[in-house]
Structure formats: structure tokens, C-alpha cells
Amino acid sequence: MTETLVVKLGGSVITDKSEPETVDREALAAAAAALAGTDARLVVVHGGGSFGHHHADEHGVTTERGTRDAAGALAVHEAMTRLSREVVDALQSAGVPALPVRPLSAGSRDADGDLSLPTEQVRRLLGEGFAPVLHGDVVAHEGEGVTVVSGDELVVEAAPAVDADRVGLCSTVPGVLDGDGDVVERVSAVEDVPALGDSDATDVTGGMAGKVQSLLGLSAPAQIFGPDALSDFLAGEAPGTTVDGR
Ligand code: IPE
């Protein structure tokens, strides 16, 4: 049976983080070519890199701290739309039937910050043979204006909605690292990696602990791996770190 995969391309993988709004074209083309090589049904999610984070910082918006400045919110959203356009173009050029899905138009957070994201359109697009592409964005947040939604949060929402068989997070690090900087092969609980305790577990956009914590709640195994391992992941291998809380 054809597998369904949710793959996140980290913002630092596809952009040059040192320069505002700069796509790393070579890295993006390589990722797109790898994604074009799979028979799996694909949902692609990407992060902000030098597009979203730059504007979010400028306007003081995080996943928890919001803004009611419409121009600031638009600056973040439009930057992410520009990056999404680049990603969708690269995917289509490589032969992936990619179409964008904008979280701002669909998702929102309640007063506790819990995200709700309608996913019927994602499921239908997938069912009709498209590869939906979601991206980090801003979303309405009760009591806060708008806050950032990270790619990792979107992965956690999308994976159960499409009944993903496997989840892949392609990042600039080769996996979850232990205290010696070596890649941990498997994580079944946050306590498995004492080094994770060093970072703030509530930091859902940047922190590895938050990333691992939310992936542990999925009913599909997730892999965290570096850019060179994307093809291996797509081929069914388990590169980097396997995060499986089942
Ligand atoms: C951030 O998404 C999105 C915005 C800042 C709008 P992520 O937090 O998933 O981005 P990366 O992958 O770390 O760059």
C-alpha cells in the first residue's frame, strides 16, 4: 500500500539564516528532487528560516506573545507566503504536485494557546493526488491578537489528520544529540535523553525538547535527521533519531 508521509523541511535547511529572506536554492532544489523521487503520498511542511523569524523578531511575535499590529502580522505572513511560493515552485519544477495551504486562513489558537487547524482540505488535496504544502505562519490567538504557529506544530496537527505512516523532520542537525554531541538512535520518552533537559521544554519553535515532546504524542514514528538523509528517510530507512512514544 502507498505510504503517507508528513515531511518538514526546517527553515534553516532551505534558507540562508544569516541573510534576511534568502533562499538556499541549492539545498531547496536537492530537497525537492529527493521528494520527487518517492511514490509516497506527501504532506510537506516548512519552517520560517530567514523569512519568518526575521519579521517575527522585528514585531515581537512568538508562539505565545502576540501582536494586534495588522501591518506587523501581515509582514510575517507575506514573508512566509513568499517562501512558500519558492518551495511550491521548486517542488513543482521537480515534479511534485505541490499546492500551498495557508495556516492563517484556517487555524487559530484558544486562550490556552491550543492550536486548532481544520484539515479537511489537506486530506482532500492528498486524496486527489496533490502534495499539500503548509508553512509556519501567524494565526488568530484568543486574547493575544495573532501569534506564530511553527512548522513543528503543523506537523503534529497534520500527521494524525492524514493518518501518516511516518513523519520526517529534516533539520540542520543530524538528529537528537546526547551530552557528548552524538546522535541518539531512539527516543521513547524525554527522560531517555538527559541532555534534552538542558533546553526549555516549552519552547515549541526552537527547542529540541519541545520538538521531541510533541512528536512523542503521535501515533506514527518520527525521524529527526539532517539534509543528506532525506532520501534515506523517503526510501523507508530510519536515519538520525527515531522518536516513537507509542
Ligand atoms: C516559524 O516556523 C514560522 C515563523 C516564524 C512565522 P518554524 O519555527 O517551524 O521555523 P524553523 O524551521 O525553525 O525555521
Image (cartoon, rainbow, N blue to C red):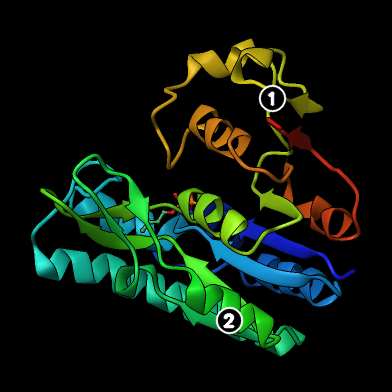
Q: Position of residue 27 (x, y in %)?
A: 69, 65
Quarter of the image where the C terminus is located? top right
Mark positioned earlier in the residue sequence (1 or 2):
2
Q: Please, what is the three-letter code of the amino acid marked with disc 1?
A: Leu
The reply to whether callout 1 and callout 2 are in contact (CB within 8 Å) is no
> Residue at horizontal 50%, vertical 69%?
134
Q: Closer to us: mark 1 or mark 2?
A: 2
The answer to whether residue 99 is visible is yes
> Residue at horizontal 45%, vertical 38%?
206
> Residue at horizontal 40%, vertical 32%?
203
Foreground residue among 22 and 195: 195
Instruction: Establish whether ligand 1 lies closer than 8 Å to the Cβ of label 1.
Output: no
Q: Please, what is the three-letter code of the amino acid marked with disc 2?
A: Arg
Quarter of the image where the N terminus is located? bottom right
> Residue at horizontal 82%, vertical 27%?
185
Q: Would residue 22 appear left or right of 95 to someone viewing this image? A: left
Q: Position of residue 240 (x, y in %)?
A: 79, 38
The answer to whether residue 19 is visible is no
Label 1 – label 2 distance at C-alpha: 37 Å
SS under mark 2: helix
How packed mark 1 is, by other alpha carbons closer than 10 Å (few <14, some 14-19, many 20 or more), is some
Q: Position of residue 109 (x, y in %)?
A: 27, 52
Foreground residue among 174 and 157: 157
Q: Is residue 186 above or below residue 77?
A: above
How packed mark 2 is, by other alpha carbons closer than 10 Å (few <14, some 14-19, many 20 or more), is few
The residue that disc 2 covers is 124
The residue that disc 1 covers is 177
